Amino acid sequence: MRIAIVGAGSIGSLYAALLSKVEGVELLVHARGQHGAVMASQGLTIEGETSMHVSNERVFFSLDEVGLPNLLHNALDIVVITGKADHTEQLALHARSLLAPGGFALCLSNGLGHAERCVEVLGPHRVFAATTTHGAWRPQPGVIHWAGVGHTVVGSLPGGPGEVEALPFLEVLKSAGLNPAWTSDGLSAVWRKVLLNISINPIASLAGVENGSLLSQNLFSAAYSTMLEGASVARIEGVSLPDDAELEAQLREVLIATSGNICSMLQDIRSGRTTEISVLNQAIVERGERAGVATPLNQMLSSMITALHFE
């Protein structure tokens, strides 16, 4: 199976490394900046839950600054889109260029609106929604710290491919140790991940702590209350979600599983990058306003994180 990871940051690089172990997988990893340059010249190193090095002889690393390799145009079976919110459209265009006529894209990016953008570019018949609770962060270019083992959920979107089409890739994810599961309701899966992100990322970022610190009573209460605001918006939009007790249990489970993880938002702030707050808490605020649902905690967190942006 020919697979590409485009927009390979922390999570994308982790997936690439684990997929590189699977027999029969040919892998392209497309990244940018210093991280991409180090991977292209020296390979990729994983530490934390496992230790491994992926050489640039085993994986084809390409740089966004250089462009996609022509020999792989219209040649890949699966393209996994893992980049930041402001790069989704460009990465979807990369996927359209790389995918073979019968190939599929997985939109694994955080936040609201990514899957819809992928559908606009690629067509609904070629796009799966996907989420992950694996924890990863980048201590330096070319090195990924796998901070917590989680799961990968792959789901169907309206008008999109189903479980039969997903099965071959689900088997590959299983062989890679990425703990995949299928859902027929990809939209619900996306929202459940968004609820985790809005409750964990901004609070951990403002406190400057690893995810596990949010298990303390005061921080957990703030995180859970923020989650419930988002859940109210989702339910008004007709999204199917578990009850509040199950949402709370999932939040606690993820915090325990990724206790040593430095969330991507805190990494962005420390590195002077713009965060993804616009597709997380701010998106909840905007959707809440349209639905007539008050979201004061999400509004406050969005305003505070935005104030930390360096641009």
Image (cartoon, helix red, strand yellow):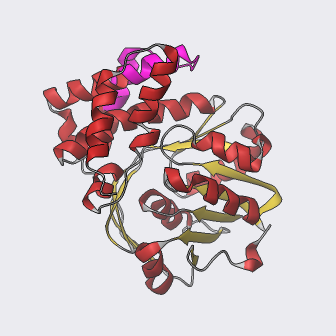
State the residue at coordinates (32%, 44%). 306
**Percent x, y of residue 29:** 57, 70
Secondary structure mostly seen in magenta is helix
Residue found at x 24% / y 42%: 204
Foreground: 119 or 2? 119
Does the magenta run of residues contain 215?
no
Residue at 58% over, 77% down? 62
- The one nearer the camera, 66 or 292, is 292
Front residue of this view, candidates 277 and 5: 277
The vertical placement of 88 against 18, above or below, is: above
Residue visible at 31% across and 22% down in the picture: 296
Does residue 237 show up magenta in the picture? yes
Q: Position of residue 9 (x, y in %)?
A: 45, 62
> Front-most of 274 and 233?
274
Looking at the image, how many numbered discs can be counted on the residues?
Answer: 0
The N terminus sits in image quarter: bottom right
Q: Is residue 37 above or below residue 166?
A: below
Which quarter of the image is occupied by the C terminus?
bottom left
Residue 125, quarter of picture: top right
- Is residue 58 something that shows in the picture? yes
List x then y, in percent, for residue 51.
35, 69
Q: Is any part of residue 59 visible from this angle?
A: no
Q: Which residue extends farthest right?
A: 101
Residue farthest toward the front in the current orientation of the protein: 311
Q: Where does residue 97 sit, x and y in percent of width and height?
A: 75, 64
The magenta-colored residue range is 229-251
Q: Is residue 108 left or right of residue 167?
A: left
Q: Is 81 situated left or right of 277 in this image?
A: right
